[in-house]
């Protein structure tokens, strides 16, 4: 990876990581949660925090005395899970502010150069994000958006219970001009586009100069229609998402046919990869998650860790994205390393990713 040029386009957020004392949805509400929603701070209060979905499902959080906010009522853009009912009461056991965002994650995991939006230098959150990027050694090209504030996320995590709910408060990335983004796309070995609106992603993915292109969507990308994820597919070499995101996409068969490599993760169930072999046939590999003798500490960043290790392994073994085919033996190795990377990262509480050497050591050690 030392001589590889990697461009990453995606958000760098401030994450207010808030760990709670139980599963976010509670017993009988399905598998662990891994879904991002947008939030709007509707009513400020003096006590705890209520996250209220459009269908009335409510997550009530008791917060510690040093909690900096928000307090009161936050309206969610959609329900964390269809059919969730009632009121779920949890306590925030600890919290901290850290670097977040898919752009920052991929840049850190791959050693890439990040292009992302920030507010003006007078915006305190933007400057905190800048300091965190520097702290973690991430090369950053900021695109300043006047009269806007930085994005930030209230990230509710259940730790050992294995689920997370990022609630995004949107600012400068939604206001970022497409031309400003596209002007930064140059020649590179790998271009990663993660967590941006489809209109922005379409320009970046179709811009010339990239040997390989990886797209990591959010569920919002799957639901957008102009352009749709199907419209983007012809410009994508590797498409990585989780199961909830994949099921939210209507044109799944067409997208799977158009992209060279499709990887769908599904928590403890592992992952599934569809790809084309050198003889032109379509192949599917499935593997369970790495067996663990202890529960996860924090499932945040598992998706970026998986996707980064997957594409890293392919490129390290001279995969030619322009041909679009992969030897099954190489894909088995890439899948194993990706699952191992995902298992390693969920043992971390702080922002960060396993190195290639750590992935190899864990894989070789069983």
Image (cartoon, rainbow, N blue to C red):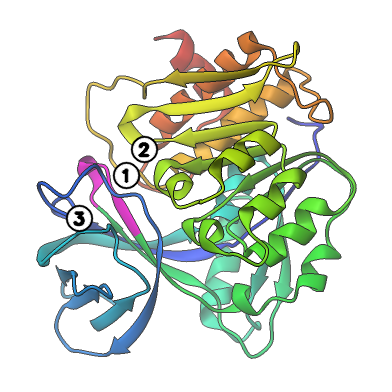
Figure check: 297 above or below 36? above
Q: Secondary structure at mark 1?
A: loop
Please give the residue where the numbered disc 2 appears in the rendered image: 346
Along the viewing direction, whichever of 362 and 166 lies nearer the viewer: 166
From where the camera sits, is residue 70 visible?
no
Q: In which quadrant will I find the C terminus?
A: top left
**Residue visible at 76% across and 52% down in the picture:** 205
Residues tagged 2 and 3 counted as in contact (Cβ below 8 A): no
Q: Earlier in the sequence, mark 1 or mark 2?
A: 1
Figure check: 95 above or below 289? below
Horizontal side, residue 364 vs residue 114: left or right: left
Q: Position of residue 329 (x, y in %)?
A: 62, 8
Q: Position of residue 7 (x, y in %)?
A: 76, 49
Residues tagged 3 and 1 counted as in contact (Cβ below 8 A): no
Q: Which residues are magenta?
A: 158-165
CA–CA distance in space, label 2 to label 3? 17 Å
Q: Position of residue 134 (x, y in %)?
A: 62, 58
Inspect the magenta stretch and tell me whether residue 222 lies in it.
no
Mark 3 is surrounded, within 10 Å at the Cα level, by few (under 14), some (14 to 19) or many (20 or more) other residues, namely: many
Mark 1 is surrounded, within 10 Å at the Cα level, by few (under 14), some (14 to 19) or many (20 or more) other residues, namely: many
Please give the residue where the numbered disc 1 appears in the rendered image: 298
Residues tagged 1 and 2 counted as in contact (Cβ below 8 A): yes
On the image, which quarter does residue 135 sit in? bottom right
């Amino acid at each position: 990876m030392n001589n590889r040029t990697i461009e990453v386009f995606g958000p760098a957020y401030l994450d207010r990581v808030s760990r709670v004392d139980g599963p976010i949805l509670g017993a009988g509400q399905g598998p662990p949660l891994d879904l991002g929603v947008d939030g709007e701070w509707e009513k400020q209060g003096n006590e705890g925090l209520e996250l209220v979905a459009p269908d009335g499902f409510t997550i009530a959080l008791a917060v510690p005395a040093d909690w900096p906010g928000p307090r009161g009522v936050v309206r969610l853009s959609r329900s964390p899970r269809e059919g969730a009912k009632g009121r779920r009461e949890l306590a925030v056991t600890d919290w901290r502010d850290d670097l977040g965002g898919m752009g920052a994650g991929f840049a850190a995991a791959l050693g890439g150069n990040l292009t992302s939006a920030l507010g003006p230098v007078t915006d305190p959150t933007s400057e905190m994000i800048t300091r965190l990027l520097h702290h973690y050694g991430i090369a950053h090209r900021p695109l300043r958006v006047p009269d806007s504030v930085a994005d930030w996320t209230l990230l509710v995590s259940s730790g050992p219970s294995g689920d997370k709910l990022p609630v995004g408060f949107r600012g400068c990335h939604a206001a970022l001009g497409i031309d400003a983004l596209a002007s930064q796309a140059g020649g590179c070995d790998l271009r990663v586009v993660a967590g941006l609106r489809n209109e922005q992603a379409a320009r970046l993915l179709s811009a010339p100069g990239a040997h390989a292109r990886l797209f990591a969507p959010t569920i919002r990308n799957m639901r957008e229609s102009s352009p749709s994820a199907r419209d983007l597919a012809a410009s994508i070499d590797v498409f990585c998402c989780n199961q909830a995101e994949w099921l939210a996409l209507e044109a799944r068969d067409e997208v799977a046919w158009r992209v060279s490599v499709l990887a769908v993760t599904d928590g403890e169930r592992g992952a599934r990869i569809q790809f084309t072999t050198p003889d032109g046939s379509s192949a599917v590999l499935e593997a369970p998650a790495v067996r663990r003798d202890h529960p996860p500490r924090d499932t945040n960043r598992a998706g970026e860790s998986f996707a980064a290790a997957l594409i890293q392994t392919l490129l390290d073994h001279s995969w030619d994205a322009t041909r679009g085919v992969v030897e099954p033996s190489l894909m088995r190795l890439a899948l194993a390393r990706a699952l191992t990377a995902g298992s390693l990262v969920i043992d971390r509480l702080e922002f960060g990713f396993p190195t290639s050497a750590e992935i190899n050591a864990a894989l070789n050690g069983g």
